[in-house]
Each structure stands twice: as structure tokens, then as C-alpha cells.
Amino acid sequence: MPWDLGMFDSRPDYKSEKQCQRTSFAFYQSVRDLLPVWTLEDMRTMEVFHWEDDGRACAFSPSEALLYALVHDHQLYARYLLNRYSVSALEMPSRSFCCCQASTTPHLSVAVRYNRVNILKMIMDSLKYFSSDSERKNYLDSRGCVHAEGGKAALHLACELVRHECLLLLLGHGACPYVMDGARDNALDCVLRQICQGEPDLRRKRDCLGYLILFMPNLHFQMKGQLQKQPGLWQSLIGEEAYTWLAGLSPPSLFVQTMQRLTQSIPLEQLDSLPDYLKPLDFRLQQYQGR
């Protein structure tokens, strides 16, 4: 039980490396077991420490606690941390949690990797508390850890893992689909590479393609040359109509162009007031409707 850890407060070694490992693991287990928020906060602020490589015992920051909440989908704890600490809960954790300090968005990457859609929504709601639009944009478009994520932004990761709900949340809150990863691929390149692999999840991959088309009025991407060289293959994968748009043979349909303008002009939270057939969440490339 978490309260058993208090007995170490009076011991001279209660901040030793071994004891830090023990208490930090107890905190990890407590978040995993979805213990009440007040219990976890008492542990975090008074009882548990983690050990840093430079030989220091450190208390868990709200940012580090939020990573645990994301991993274990403790939505109540994530909501508390974001409501109580706002964007401070999204700050960069210590090196023991993320080896690549150049990455500023480990929470976005973890949310996408574990498909924590509800907590990702909470994070998106917290973005309004950034001090400026440029700070918010930089946060959304920042590349992830080069070791764990290959330097990919959260949007690339959503495409690579075919997390279509995460993808729509990120796009709807202003993530730039033209940002490139270390291989100079943008999000559309990532989705097309996934589609090229075929099954499994081919329909969800096509959904991701549809969402990206809605948020990319200028269809710039590296793989356009490959599409033009292999028309038969790509028409079979994405359909003739989508192929002509992506290969630059014709502009998108009037409906798609209207939807592109709509997604740029209406806040995501207002999409619920639209008719179902006009919501991006229900958008499909025309040739795949009903399949």
C-alpha cells in the first residue's frame, strides 16, 4: 500500500538510489491500479522520489505524473493534473523519463502511441492556456525523441500507427500537416507508406488519408513521383478519384474543396452542430462509402 512508504521518511537512506527505485515503482503501480487522485497526489508530493543519473533524488513533477497517467489511462488523474497545473503539466520531464531533451512533446507522443484519445482531448483543451499562438503551434509541431520516435512529430506518429481519432484531434487543433520528419516525409507521406503495405487496417488508413486531404489544401508530399510512376497500383489502393487528386491530374471535388475551407474556418468544438454528412469525422473518400 502507498502509506507503507512513509516509514522511510525517518531513515537516513530514504533518498538513496535503491529506495528511490522502490518508491517510484510503488507510485507507478499505484497509477496503474487507478488509485484515487488524492492518494496519488499525497504520494507524489510527500512520499515518492525518482533517481536521476547525476545522483539526485527528485520528487515527481506534474509532468512526470501525467506520463504515468497516460501510460495507464488514468483519466481522472490526468484531468486533475491538467486542471490543477494547466500547461505546466505538459513541460519537459527530467532526463530519466525522456533521454532526448530536444523533444518538447513526450505527452503527445505517448498519448498517440497508447491511443489515449480521451486524455489527448484534455491536452488539446489545455492548449488555450499557452501564452501565444506561436507557442501552441511549436508545441503541436515539435519533433519527438529521435531515439524512441525517430524524430517524428505526434502527427507523423498518428499516421504511422493509424490512430485516426488522434490524427483528427491534432489536425483540428492546428497541427501542421506539412511538417517533415527526419526523412523529410510529411504526414501524407506517412499515410501513403502505410496504405502501400495494404492490410491490416486498410480502411482506417484510408480514413487517415481522407482527414489529411481535408486539412491540406496544397497537396505537397514526397511520394507524388511514386504515385505518378505506378498509377495502376495506387488506383487500386486509394481509388481512381483520390489518385487523380494526389497525382496532380485534377483538383479535388467541389465537396472536398468546400470541406477544406470549412475545416480551416470553424473551431473543432463547433463541428458537433453541423449535419452528420458535413462532419470530418464522417468523411470518407467517395469510392469507399458503404464498404
Image: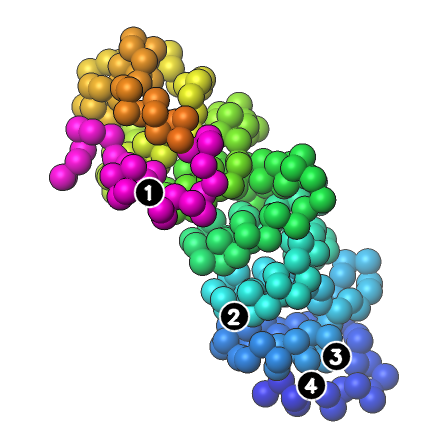
Which residue carries the number 4 mark?
5
Q: Farthest residue toward the right?
A: 12
Q: Does residue 287 appear to the left or right of 106 in the view shown?
A: left
Q: Earlier in the sequence, mark 1 or mark 2?
A: 2
Which residue carries the number 1 mark?
274
Q: Are marks 1 and 2 in contact (CB under 8 Å)?
A: no
Q: Residues within 10 Å of mark 2 (few under 14, many from 20)?
A: some
Q: Nearer the viewer, mark 2 or mark 3?
A: 2
Residue 253 forms part of the magenta stretch? no
Q: Position of residue 171 (x, y in %)?
A: 47, 37
Q: Nearer the viewer, mark 3 or mark 4?
A: 3
Q: Main secondary structure of the magenta part?
A: helix
Q: Position of residue 29 (x, y in %)?
A: 55, 75
Q: Nearer the viewer, mark 1 or mark 4?
A: 1
Kind of residue indicated by mark 1: Leu
Q: Can residue 66 be seen?
A: yes
Q: Earlier in the sequence, mark 1 or mark 3?
A: 3
Task: Give the residues drawn in magenta, as a range.
Answer: 263-291
